[in-house]
Image (cartoon, grey):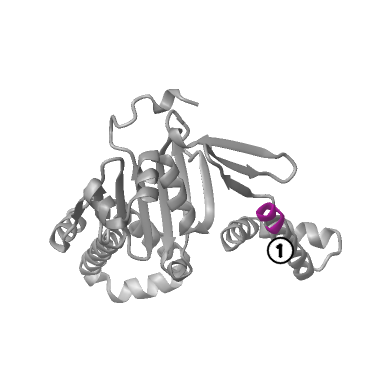
């Protein structure tokens, strides 16, 4: 609800002028009008939530969605190529996460299916059904025997590698451009008389000020890029198993991707 309400609020802010004029044209109090609009948005989100269901069947995952036009998406487990997991830090105590499922042969940039907020057990069940051999092992052996049958190879990024990667990233270039553009906008927002009075007093130091501002922008860009990369790839872990690869990363939002090794299922994209 928070995610969708926030999106709608952004749209309302962008159109607040025309909406206010329209409400005043019909002699409606703008406060009451925007309040009614917010209630309507929340009601639509709740109805959409109630109409969204999914079923983990024996041979496929079925997702039902839509308010006026019902959409039923059937995803056989054999066609699932990757499972992406996103979990914000405040959802970890509740064991809730977001799942994005991509299938083999799906050319669209958007995932085949998205489960916005589900228990962690849902991902475990889907992964177990996606790899039948793994599920049979889980059902027939204990944990220690499973580890002996299916060895794991794990790579964990060390802090030195992460720091070198973050400090040498070219991600500072877009940030520098954004900050310079923001600096220009701030100058435009300052009244001209204020700029003239300040300029007349420091005209001989203008070059020094420009250099200092440029250095500050570069330092802020480096710090911003560094912190962004470090929190994104914090404790990056790659685990290679017999039937799948798993990655984990992120500080505030833990992201995980589960994919089959290349060539492990060459005919999966041809089976429906």
Residue under numbered circle 1: 38
From what the image shows, is residue 190 above or below residue 14? Answer: below
From what the image shows, is residue 107 above or below residue 20? Answer: above
Quadrant of the rendered image containing residue 216: bottom left
Q: Is residue 69 visible?
A: yes
Residue nearer the viewer, 136 or 186: 136
At x 38% / y 75%, what residue is drawn?
197
Q: In this view, does 15 lie to the left or right of 244?
A: right
Quadrant assignment for the N terminus: bottom right
Residue 256 rendering spot, x and y as whole percentages:
36, 52
On whether residue 56 falls in the magenta region, the answer is no
Q: Is mark 1 on a helix, strand or loop?
A: helix
At x 30% / y 63%, what residue is drawn?
231
Quadrant of the rendered image containing residue 71: top right
Residue nearer the viewer, 27 or 192: 27
From what the image shows, is residue 166 above or below residue 205? Answer: above
Magenta region, residue range: 46-50
Farthest residue, direction front: 140
How many numbered discs sit on the rendered protein? 1
Residue 45 rendering spot, x and y as whole percentages:
67, 56
Q: Can residue 150 be seen in this view?
A: no
Q: Is residue 259 left or right of residue 169?
A: right
Residue 44 rendering spot, x and y as whole percentages:
72, 55
Quadrant of the rendered image containing residue 62: top right
Residue nearer the viewer, 147 or 34: 147
Residue 150 rendering spot, x and y as whole percentages:
25, 46
Name the chief secondary structure element in magenta.
helix
Mark 1: give few (<14), some (14-19) or many (20+) Cα within 10 Å: some
């Amino acid at each position: 609800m928070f995610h969708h309400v926030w999106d709608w609020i952004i749209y309302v802010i962008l159109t607040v002028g025309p909406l206010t004029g329209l409400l005043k044209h019909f002699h409606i109090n703008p406060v009451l009008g925007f309040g009614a609009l917010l209630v309507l948005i929340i009601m639509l989100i709740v109805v959409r939530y109630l109409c969204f269901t999914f079923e983990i069947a024996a041979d496929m995952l079925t997702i039902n969605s839509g308010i006026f036009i019902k959409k039923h998406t059937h995803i056989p487990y054999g066609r699932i190529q990757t499972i992406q997991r996103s979990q914000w830090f405040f959802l970890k105590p509740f064991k809730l996460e977001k799942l994005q499922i991509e299938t083999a042969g799906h050319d669209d940039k958007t995932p085949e299916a998205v489960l916005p907020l589900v228990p962690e057990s849902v991902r475990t069940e889907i992964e177990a059904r996606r790899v039948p051999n793994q599920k049979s092992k889980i059902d027939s052996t204990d944990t220690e025997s499973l580890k002996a049958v299916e060895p794991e190879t794990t790579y964990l990024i060390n802090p030195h590698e992460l720091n070198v990667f973050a400090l040498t990233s070219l991600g500072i270039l877009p940030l520098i451009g954004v900050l310079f553009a923001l600096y220009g906008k701030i100058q435009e927002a300052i009244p001209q008389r204020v700029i003239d009075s300040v300029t007349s007093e420091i005209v001989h130091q203008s070059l020094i000020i420009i250099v200092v501002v440029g250095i500050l922008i570069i330092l802020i860009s480096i710090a911003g890029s560094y912190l962004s990369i470090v929190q994104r790839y914090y404790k990056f872990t790659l685990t290679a198993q017999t039937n799948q690869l798993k990655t984990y990363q992120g500080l505030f939002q833990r992201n995980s991707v589960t994919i089959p090794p290349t060539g492990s299922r060459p005919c999966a994209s041809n089976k429906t």
